[in-house]
């Protein structure tokens, strides 16, 4: 699994460059997220634009990533595809996470 990190003044964007977060990839995802968020501060935006499938293991890994945030850090989600969005809504995780339509809109002022 590849996570692409882009640092901006408004937030750090972590783009998931795979189509699935599921049982075979969840543990690696969680470890990679811990490594990436362990050395930063502020807002982290998890861009799930490429992810078209997430199962309970993947959902658990995303939740675990949020729970490992330190004081002064937050994890927000962006670009949920329809099936992924449905999983977050059915499990009511959409009430726990801040979810954005587009990660690039959050950091747009930094791109100029």
Image: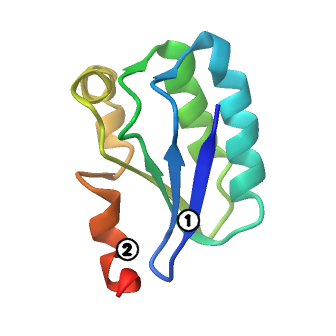
Q: Which residue is mark 1?
A: 6
Residue 66 pos. (x, y %): 57, 46
Residue 83 pos. (x, y %): 27, 20
Residue drawn at x 33%, y 28% is 88
Mark 1 and mark 2 lie on one chain; the one further toward the N terminus is: 1
Residue drawn at x 34%, y 52% is 98
| Residues at marks 1 and 2, CA–CA distance in whole angstroms | 10 Å
Identify the coloring.
rainbow
Residue found at the very far bottom of the displayed protein: 112
Left or right: residue 59 compared with residue 81 = right
Left or right: residue 68 compared with residue 54 = right
**Is residue 4 or residue 62 the one in the foreground?**
4
Mark 2 element type = helix
Query: Callout 1: 10 Å neighbours few (<14), some, many (20+)?
Result: few
Left or right: residue 55 compared with residue 64 = left
Q: Quadrant of residue 76?
A: bottom left
The numbered mark at residue 77 is none
| The C terminus: image quadrant | bottom left
Residue 33 pos. (x, y %): 67, 45
Mark 1 element type = strand
Residue 54 pos. (x, y %): 44, 20
Query: Callout 2: 10 Å neighbours few (<14), some, many (20+)?
Result: some
Residue drawn at x 74%, y 46% is 34
The numbered mark at residue 107 is 2
Q: Quadrant of residue 48?
A: top left
**Is residue 77 or residue 90 the one in the foreground?**
77
Against 105, is 35 above or below?
above
| The N terminus: image quadrant | top right
| Contact check, label 1 and label 2, Cβ < 8 Å | yes
Residue drawn at x 35%, y 40% is 49
């Amino acid at each position: 699994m590849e996570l692409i990190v882009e640092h901006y003044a408004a937030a750090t964007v972590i783009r998931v460059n795979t189509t699935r977060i599921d049982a075979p990839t969840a543990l690696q995802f969680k470890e990679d997220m811990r490594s990436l968020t362990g050395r930063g501060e502020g807002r982290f935006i998890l861009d799930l634009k490429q992810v078209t499938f997430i199962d309970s293991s993947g959902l658990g890994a995303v939740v675990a990533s949020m729970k490992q945030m330190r004081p002064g850090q937050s994890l927000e989600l962006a670009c949920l595809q329809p099936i992924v969005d449905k999983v977050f809504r059915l499990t009511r995780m959409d009430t726990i996470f801040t979810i954005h339509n587009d990660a690039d809109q959050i950091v747009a002022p930094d791109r100029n």
